[in-house]
């Protein structure tokens, strides 16, 4: 008699089927968990430590008034969401270029400096002008400059060309801050 005849034949075992069922359940649970995480990221949920670094532009939080005598609401504004034009109304040579460089160093998009129009008198106080819709940007610039005044863009625009190009904010640089470094901030 051969040895094969003495050994009993083994059929499908219940432990092997149990292992396959358990493995199927684990794989299904992992798939559901991954699907949830992917859908949460697509839906804009908080991804916690699973997020990847982004190349977003620097932002700064500013306070803007929502209405007179009401609470101040913080607004986050990207520094690259608007362009700034600096016009020298101080008659201090090179001061608009210096301010342009300082603002660029803080992350703002600033067009090359220009002079004020010939009919604009020498200004002692700096004013930040804005095109409608750019009030928050003007407030951020005014704060960066140390709390100067803001106002709606005058007509005609008081630059030597009578325009601000792509800028939505115009700084009419006065003698109060011409040639001085920006406040720490």
Image (cartoon, grey):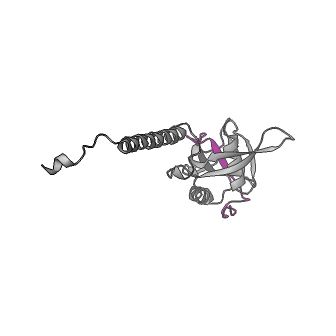
Where is residue 15 drawn, in percent x and y? 38, 45
Q: Quadrant of the C terminus?
A: bottom right
**Which of these two is toward me, 9 or 154?**
9
Q: Which segment is the magenta one? A: 158-185
Main secondary-structure element of the magenta-colored stretch: loop
User: Going 65% across and 52% down the picture, which residue do you hit?
Assistant: 60
User: Going 34% across and 42% down the picture, which residue do you hit?
Assistant: 13
User: In the figure, is residue 26 to the left or right of 131?
Assistant: left
Q: Is residue 43 visible?
A: yes
**Which of these two is toward me, 73 or 184?**
73
Q: Is residue 120 visible?
A: no
Q: Residue furthest front?
A: 1
Location of residue 9 by image quarter: top left
Where is residue 73 drawn, in percent x and y? 76, 44
User: Going 69% across and 55% down the picture, which residue do you hit?
Assistant: 144
User: Going 66% across and 56% down the picture, which residue do you hit?
Assistant: 91
| Number of numbered discs overlaid on the protein picture | 0
Q: Residue furthest right?
A: 69
Where is residue 49 drawn, in percent x and y? 54, 53
User: In the figure, is residue 13 to the left or right of 185?
Assistant: left
Location of residue 20 by image quarter: top left
Based on the picture, tell me whether residue 144 belongs to the magenta stretch. Answer: no
Where is residue 147 drawn, in percent x and y? 75, 54
Based on the picture, tell me whether residue 176 belongs to the magenta stretch. Answer: yes
Q: Residue furthest left?
A: 1
**Which of these two is toward me, 179 or 149?**
149
**Image height of 49 relative to 10, above or below:** below
């Amino acid at each position: 008699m051969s040895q094969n005849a003495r050994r009993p034949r083994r059929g499908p075992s219940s432990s092997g089927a149990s292992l396959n069922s358990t493995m199927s359940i684990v794989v299904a649970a992992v798939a559901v968990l991954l699907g949830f995480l992917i859908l949460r990221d697509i839906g804009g949920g908080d991804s916690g430590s699973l997020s990847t670094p982004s190349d977003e532009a620097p932002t700064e939080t500013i306070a803007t008034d929502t209405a007179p005598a009401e609470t101040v609401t913080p607004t986050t504004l990207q520094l690259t969401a608007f362009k700034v034009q600096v016009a020298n109304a101080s008659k201090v040579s090179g001061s608009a270029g210096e301010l342009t460089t300082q603002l660029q160093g803080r992350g703002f998009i600033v067009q090359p400096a220009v002079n004020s129009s010939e009919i604009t008198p020498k200004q002692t106080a700096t004013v930040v002008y804005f095109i409608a819709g750019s009030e928050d940007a003007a407030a951020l610039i005014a704060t960066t400059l140390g709390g100067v005044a803001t106002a709606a863009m005058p007509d005609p625009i008081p630059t030597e060309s009578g325009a601000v190009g792509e800028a939505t904010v115009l700084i009419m640089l006065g003698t109060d801050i011409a040639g001085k470094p920006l406040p720490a901030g």
